[in-house]
Image (tube, coloured by chain):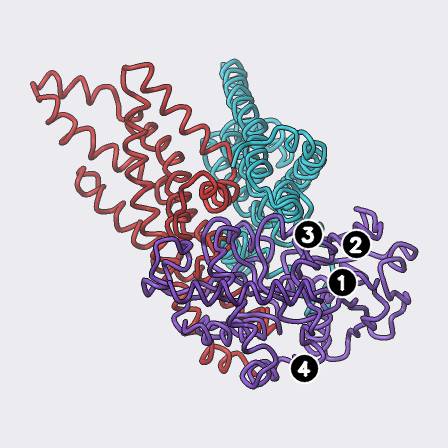
Chain colours: A red, B purple, C cyan
Amino acid sequence: MNYWEFLIQYLPKMASGAVMTVSVMICALLLAVTISIIFGLMRITNSKPIQGVAFVYIEFFRGTSLLVQLYWIYYVLPLMGLTLSPFMSGVIALGLNFGAYGAEVVRGGIQAVPKAQWEAALALNFSSKQRIRRIIIPQTFTIILPPAANLTVELLKATALVALITVVDLMFVAKQLNATTWLSAQVFGTALLVYYAMARFALIPFLRWLEVLAARKVGKS
Amino acid sequence: MLQNLKSKALSVMVGALLIGTAQAATADELSDRINAGEPIRLGFATAIPWAYPGDNGEPLGFVNAIALVVLEEMGITNYETSVNEWAGLIPGLQANRYDIITGGMYILKSRCENMNFSDPIGLFGDAMLVPAGNPKGIHNYQDVISTGAKLVTGAGFNTVEAAKKEGVPEDQMMLVAGEVEILAAMNAGRADVAVQTFFGAKEHVDKSNGKFEVTNPADMPEWTKNWVGIGMRHSDTDFLAAFNEAMAKVVGGEAWMANTAEYGYTEFQLPGEDASTEFACANR
Amino acid sequence: MEWRWEFAIEILPRMLWATGNTLLAAGAGYAIAMVVGLILMFGQQTPYRVVNIVVRELVEFVRSTPLLVQLFFVFFVAPQFGVTLSAWTSAMLTIGLHFGTYLSEVYRGALEGVPKTQWEACRALNFSTVYTYRRVILPQAFPIALPGMGNYLVGIFKDTPLLATIGVAELMHTANALGAETYRYLEPYTMVGAIFLIISLPTALGLRRLEAAVARHQGKLNH
C-alpha cells in the first residue's frame, strides 16, 4: 500500500495515541511545575535543613535515569503495597523527574534577578509580599522561560517512555502497528513526524508566545 | 492417571461448592471482584498467533480465544485487556495489574513457584528459525553450541532456561523484548538463529516471505515439549478452581476448536487425558 | 517482599559487568556526538544556503523527536532497506546523532558567546583563520560550552537504558533479564538505580569543579 493509504487507515489510531501522549504530558507538566516552584524556593530559604531536603531530592532525581524511575514505580512499588495505574505511574515519574530539573531552573531564575531590584523595592517601602509579587516574580518569570521551554520540549519527548509501562500513547500504538503490519518505515516515520509536529508547530510557538507575554508584562518589549 | 482423576474430581467438587456459595465472604479477592461485577483483566504480550491485541485492543490469538470460551462458560463476559512486554507479564500479575495471564505461558517449575497455572490448554513444542536453506545446519541447542552461532530469543521465554540447561554459553545468546524484536534481529542479520515456540516460528516464516524457514520441532530435546496454562496469582485459588472446572466442560469442544481454528490450533495441540499441571510444575 | 542480600550479592558481578558496557556505550556515543555536533554546526554555516537550511531542519527534527522512537526506527527500518548493522553499532550511531544535534547547539551558542570584537581584532592583526580559531576563539568558546557539554555527558549516560529496548546488553537490559529469569525485580531495579546514582553524582560534581577551574584559568588569561 502506498503512504496515503497507510495514513488513511492508520492515522486515526495514531492520533488517539497522540491524544494520550498530550494528556500524559499536561498532567506531568502540572506536577513538575508545582514541584519546581516548591523545591526551587526550598533551595533558597535560609533554613539549612529545608535546603538540604530539597538538595537531596533534586540530586536524586537528576542523578538517576528516568526509565529506571519509571520501571521502579511501575514494578517495584506494588510489591511494597502501592499500585498506581500505568498512567499515574508515568505521570508521577515524569513529574518528579522534571520537577527536579525545574527546581534548579527556578532557583537560578530567582538568584539571577539583580540584587539591586530587591534593594530598590526595599528602599521604595514595598511590603515583602508586594516586592515578591510585583517586582521579583515577573522578572523571574522572564528569566526562567527559555530554559523552562527547553525542559517542556524534553518532557514531551520523554512521554514516549511511558509506552514501556503499557500506557497506550503514540509510541505504544506505533509499536503495536509495527508488530501487526511490519510497515516499520511508515509506522515509525509517521510517529516521528507527529512528535515533530507537536513540538515544532504547537508546543514551541505556545512557549514563544508565553515569552512575549512575559516580556510585555515586564515592559521589555 | 488415577491421581489426575482424583484431583480433577476434587476440583470439580470444590468448584461446585464454591460456585454454589459464590456470595460467601471467604471467596478470594479476584472472585469477589468478579462477583461485584468488575471486569476480569487479561494480561498478554504481542505473540502472534498465541495472543495479541486487535485494532481496538480486543484480545486475539488462540490462548485468548480459549480463555474467553472458558470465561463464558463461567458466565463472565466482562473483560479488559492489558498488553505488556513478555518479561513483565509475571511481575505485572503479582503487581495486580491484571488478573490472568493469557500470553501462552509454558508451565515451568520456576514459574510455578511464583504463580499458579490452570489445567493445561494444550501441548506445544519449540523450534528454531533459520535462514532459508539452513546454511549452518542448526537443528537444536547442541548444534548452536558446536557452530558458535548467535542465538536470539525473548527475555523471560522458556527457551532461555532451556538454552542454559543445554549449555549454550552466555556470549552466544542475545535477548530481546519479544517476538517482534526476534524477527527484526533475524532480519537484520544480528543473529544466526532464533529459538521460540513452533507456532511463533511458523508465524515468522509466513511474515518473512521465504527468507526464513523453521526447523523440525522433533529435533529439539524431548523435555522441551511442554504444556501451556493460564496464569493466576497464588492467592486466587477459588477462581483457579472455578476456572478449571469450567475448562473441563469445554476443552476440545465445539466453541474451543472453532474459535482457535483460524490461528492454526488443531486437535494435535489438545492437552490430552494425561495432561497435568502438577506434573509439569514438577518436571519441567 | 523483603530485600534479600544474598541474591543482591549473587547478581552483583553480572550487574557490574553490564555497568562496564553502559559506560562504554555512553563514552562511545558521546565521542560520536562530539564529532557529529561539529559537523552539524559547520553544516549550518556553509556558503551554500540550501545546505545550511537542510542541515538546520535535520538538526531541529532530530532534536525535537524522542530518542526512543529514533532507536526503534533504526532498529526496525534500517534492515528493511538493506542496512544491516549490529545492535551496538546502530545504537551508537543513533545516540551519537541525537546528542550530536544537542551539542551542535551548544557549540553554536558558545561561538556566538565570544565577543564579536575578538574576531575583528584577529582580522585587524592579520591572523590566519586556523590561528584565530586555535589561539583566540576556541579557548574563549570552550568555557562557555563546557557546562552544556557536561550536562549532555551525564544525560547520555542516563539515556543508555533506552538501548535495552533494542537488545543492547547494558545495565537496564541485564536487570530486566535477571528479573525475568529469577522473578525478583526488587533487587535488580534498585541496584540499577543505585549504580546510576553512584556514577552520575560524582561525575556531576566533578564537572562543576572543572567548570570552576576553567573559568578561573580564563580569568587569569583575560588580563
**Dot 2 surroundings within 10 Å: few (below 14), some, or many (20 or more)?**
many
Discs 3 and 4 share one subunit:
yes
Same chain for the residues at labels 3 and 1, yes or no? yes
Q: Is residue C106 above or below residue C97?
A: above
Q: Nearer the viewer, residue A183 or C131?
A: A183
Are dots 1 and 2 in contact, CB under 8 Å?
Answer: yes
Query: Residues at badges 3 and 4 in contact (C-beta under 8 Å)?
Result: no
Q: Quadrant of the C terminus of chain B?
A: bottom right
Q: Earlier in the sequence, mark 4 or mark 2?
A: 2
Q: Chain of mark 3?
A: B
Question: Along the horizontal axis of the image, is B130 left or right of B280?
Answer: right
Amino acid type, mark 4: Thr
Q: From the image, state whether disc 3 or disc 1 is nearer to you.
A: 3
Q: Share a chain, discs 4 and 1?
A: yes
Q: Chain of mark 1?
A: B
Q: Is residue B42 visible?
A: yes
Residue at 39%, 23% (x, y): give it: A55
Residue placed under numbered mark 4 in the picture = B266
Q: Is residue A192 visible?
A: no
Asked whether the residues under the numbered discs 2 and 3 touch, taking CB atoms below 8 Å apart as contact, a structural biologist would say: no
Where is residue A133? Give x, y as percent: 14, 31
Above or below B55: residue A118: above
Can you identify the residue that label 2 sits on? B163
Q: Which residue is mark 3?
A: B109
Q: Nearer the viewer, residue A15 or B136?
A: B136
Pointers 4 and 2 within a single chain: yes
Q: Earlier in the sequence, mark 2 or mark 3?
A: 3
